[in-house]
Image (tube, grey):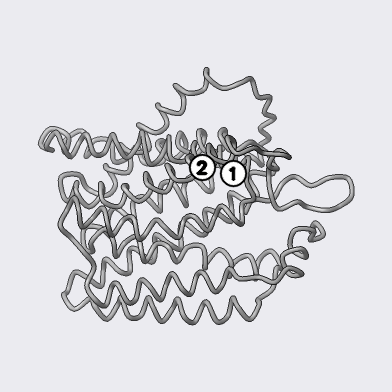
Amino acid sequence: MYRGAGDDTGVTPLIETARPAGAGKTDLAKIAAAAGLAVVLWASSFVAIRGIGHALSPGPLALLRLGVAAVTLTALLPARRPVHVRLSRKAFLLIAAYAVVWLAGYTVALNAGEHHVDAGTAALLVNLAPLLVAVAAGKLLGEGFSRSLIVGSLVALSGAAVIATAATTQRDWAGVLLCLLAAALYAAGVMIQKVALRHVDGFTAIWLGCVVATVVLLPWAPQLVGELQTASAPAVLSAVYLGVFPTAIGFTAWAYALRRMDAGRLSAVTYAVPAASVLLSWLLLAEIPTAYGLVGGALCLIGVAISRRTTHNSAATRTTAPRRG
């Protein structure tokens, strides 16, 4: 969930933009379509990365993906209605921080992790990120630790341990650790983005984030040029696909849905990403997680779901939490 800038009552709303009242069936259908599109595109990214394999190294692949996303989002700017953005130095630094941690760091770590584990297992491990966000929010934002969060954490951690036991080869454990690192970077990026979105709209934050991440990854440009000369056409097209669809269009579709639906309810849709990734990985790559991976992944998802359970009163308390500082 994203925190807004607050109002003169000293109350910080959880949602950056509220859903318009009286949404009709057509609007709800559009919201569902946008959210579903984002989930499918994000799930496909795990499969695309795995399919590229070693044709492109983790750093060069991240550079190409985010560079394509930045160009795509820049091309979409003229289609948007004029938006007046006052980008302060603080706002830019926050965007730059989450761009480095989330867009750049997470992408490189995930690319490296999928050199060792299949797409489904990677998606299951990365989906621990919502739980990490909840824990960080409880510690850093003063939201506290509910019983459901503690229980969910223990269940999810046990799931990660089960997946780790399946890493019997010398390379597999490295993939598990890299995917867990990706989940941690994802969660840290979300926490930073929560603060950044108090100062700038979602589309601008994503667009500038992709631009900053591309600049940060430029040291891999010479290696990317060399690898593009030997990479197969399908591998290059898959990298371009990652930039245009899961990154640019996926995040844009998600922003559309988020503006029109409660963020808490909408975030539950992301639980479908690992399942969709496993299915696509099986259909397109003939890969499925091991039995340990499936059981551990199920425990991870159950743990995340438990951690997100809240009572009506606790939800109301967080929605109207007094602004700090």
Q: Secondary structure at mark 2?
A: helix
Which x, y percent locates residue 75?
Answer: 44, 21
Residue at image x 49%, y 40%?
34
The three-letter amino acid code for the residue at tag 1 is: Leu
Number of residues whose C-alpha sits closer than 10 Å to that of mark 2, classed few (under 14), some (14–19) or many (20 or more): many
Q: Quadrant of the C terminus?
A: bottom right
Which x, y percent locates residue 49?
Answer: 26, 49
The three-letter amino acid code for the residue at tag 2 is: Trp
Image height of 255 relative to 276, above or below = above
Q: Which residue carries the number 1 mark? A: 258
Residue at image x 78%, y 65%?
317
Q: Residue 77 bears which disc, if any?
A: none
Q: Which residue carries the number 2 mark? A: 254
Q: Is residue 9 left or right of residue 135?
A: right
Residue at image x 43%, y 40%?
250
Res 60 quadrant in image? top left
Marks 2 and 1, how far apart at CA = 6 Å
Q: How many marks?
A: 2
